[in-house]
Amino acid sequence: QVQLVESGGGLVQAGGSLRLSCAASGSIFRLNDMGWYRQAPGKQRELVADITSSNWTSYEESVKGRFTISRDNAKNTVYLEMNSLKPEDTAVYYCNAVLVTDEYRYLDVWGQGTLVTVSS
């Protein structure tokens, strides 16, 4: 059983910052790509940022220069540092990981989501 647990969401004023964390636990042999997605009310889920096992990163256009994704492989954790937040960043943020289990099975796992609300 593999689990992703997110933390760090909350309410912040426009221009403020938040840091999201997502810790993976369970029978993990290797974590491959990890990413953050978000889903605003009435909208489809979209990729915000992702990071490969080699630390290559990519970002959705609207967050470039404001958000930074990073990972700590020793802790099986991925982070999303969000600065200069805007009301349009309000959404439920989900962590995703593509991994290999101890039984050498490939899994695509999602966290439960954490709400980020940016007030104007």
Image: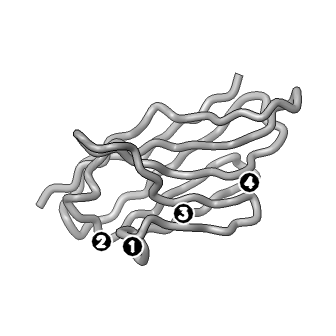
- Gap between marks 3 and 4 measured at Cα: 13 Å
Q: Residue furthest left?
A: 120
SS for dot 2: loop
Residue at position x 59%, y 63% in the image: 70
Residue at position x 63%, y 43% in the image: 97
| Marker disc for residue 66 | 1
| Marker disc for residue 69 | 3
Q: Residue furthest top?
A: 1
Marks 4 and 2: in contact by CB < 8 Å? no
Q: Quadrant of residue 60?
A: bottom left
Q: Which residue is mark 4?
A: 73
- Gap between marks 4 and 1 measured at Cα: 23 Å
Identify residue type, mark 2.
Ser
Measuring from the top left, give residue 50's x and y in whole percent: 57, 58
SS for dot 4: helix
Marks 2 and 1: in contact by CB < 8 Å? yes
Identify residue type, mark 4.
Asn
Residue at position x 79%, y 29% in the image: 27
Q: Residues within 10 Å of mark 4 (few under 14, many from 20)?
A: few
Q: Residues within 10 Å of mark 2 (few under 14, many from 20)?
A: some
Q: Which residue is mark 2?
A: 84
Measuring from the top left, give residue 17's x and y in whole percent: 33, 64
State which tag comes first along the sequence, 1 or 2: 1
